[in-house]
Amino acid sequence: MTGRRPLCSLVLGGCALATLAGCPAPEPPSVDRPPASSSAAVPLPARETGASIGLPAYQGPPPAGPRSSGPVTRLRAAVDLTPAAPGVFSRVRFAAAAPDGGGYVVLTPDDAGLPERLGTVSLVGGRFAVTASVPIPLGDVWGMQRLTDGRLALAGPLPTGEGNTGGYGFAVLDPRTGAHRTIVALPFGSPSDLAFGRSALGPDGRTMYLFISLAAGAGPRQRLMAVDGRSGRVLSDRDLSSDVAGASEVPVGHDVAGLVPRPGGGVALVFDATPDATRPGRIPTVLTFDARLAPVGGPVRVTSLAEGARTRAVAAGIDGTVFLVVAVPGAAWILAVPDRGGAGPVLVQLTDSLYDHALVVEPAQVWALVPAPTGAQAVDLTTGKLRPPVDVGCPGQHVRAMFPAGDGADALLIGECDSPRTRTQMLWIVGR
């Protein structure tokens, strides 16, 4: 590829799109490319600040991948989540698909002294509604995945009790009854630890991955762990300090953006690196690890420092591709990094950067979904084509996040609506 990113302009809210060929989009702030850099993981005295263009770039949907199901076009259900946390004002933060086309949601109360709750949304009498609600035995939820046996793995800090001394790990929970067991992967350290984390589930449906970034009194720690969801055994444990230091002068901390599972096992960690602590810029960066948590290549810089990008959302492709939405001055870009690959062209440019904070990509990797003023909007990642927005039926809505769905739906949207009450917490199920 050349030193300049091909891109196509996309205006959310109904403006016309051009295709990638001959697109009249404005040029990015700075997209000159340096010579290809080494992929070695050895920390350098002066960290690279150019995009990693010396590796294979994303070439589009996988040839052997599933057939595209088409763009999202309609709202299938709008569910008031108030019954999942009755009498307590809470905010919905996570969702995961349920087998019947419904979903599971995590609600966090404003009162920090109350437990977070897991709500189940199921199909009853032809409509979706909250059918169960149980407390979550975590101090905070960093991620949620559904295991093959139907239980949910929720990651985060585990309070002291239930036969353990507390630490970071998983609560494996039955969403109907609340029965659970806790898995402490890393015991608590200093009481002053400030922790950030993300979780992912491997393709086998039982290997759980946990990334933890700690700002501790004895110095920052960066850990990546693989845990067996059935036995609770820690399968692998890697100190990422040197891996992170190869791309960033500061620990990952709150700049962690996502943990993406790889089809052959292992994960890709996405974060905004700080290559020079004396400068304010960040670089969206991907570190890849195999099933044994050994590094696969070195840090992949998705953009250059000069482009001024910050990661806003991350989604996983079926073939290990990492999809990102990054905010740049005056716009946002959808980018893709293939497994074992590097930086490539901008797939879509969003000129309305108010709606760059969430992303869902279908398994075929043709259509993606992003927020829109009325709810959500489908984008063709191969052409930049934009579909009319899906209206979730709430003029005062705020879509906070999106998650993949299944069984006829394409995405679960969570957020709030000012109807029937102010700041009503909602789950919207959208599909074709």
Image (cartoon, rainbow, N blue to C red):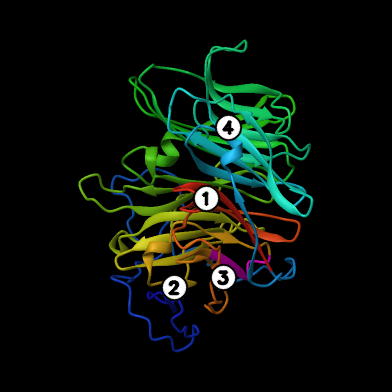
How far apart are labels 1 and 4 at the CA level? 40 Å
Q: Residue furthest front?
A: 420
Magenta extent:
364-369
Residue under pointer 1: 297
Residue neighbourhood size for the residue with mark 1, other residues' Cα within 10 Å, grouped as few (<14), some (14–19), many (≥20): some
Instruction: List x then y, in percent, for residue 291.
Output: 65, 41
Q: Is residue 25 left or right of residue 365?
A: left
- Is residue 366 part of the magenta span, yes or no? yes
* Circles 4, 3 touching at the beta carbon (< 8 Å): no
What is the three-letter code of the residue carrying label 2?
A: Leu
Instruction: List x then y, in percent, for residue 79.
Output: 62, 51
Q: Residue at x 42, y 55 (%)?
A: 312
Secondary structure beneath label 3: strand
Of the image marks 3 and 1, the number of the one nearer the N terminus:
1
Vertical arrangement, residue 252 with respect to residue 331, above or below: above
Q: How many marks?
A: 4
Camera sees residue 217: yes
Residue under pointer 2: 12
What is the three-letter code of the residue carrying label 4?
A: Arg
Mark 1 against mark 4, which lies toward the viewer?
4
Depth check, front residue: 396 or 195: 396
Depth check, front residue: 65 or 293: 65
Residue under pointer 3: 378
Residue under pointer 4: 117
Of the image marks 1 and 4, the number of the one nearer the N terminus:
4
Instruction: List x then y, in percent, for residue 230.
Output: 74, 28
Residue neighbourhood size for the residue with mark 4, other residues' Cα within 10 Å, grouped as few (<14), some (14–19), many (≥20): many
What is the three-letter code of the residue carrying label 1?
A: Gly
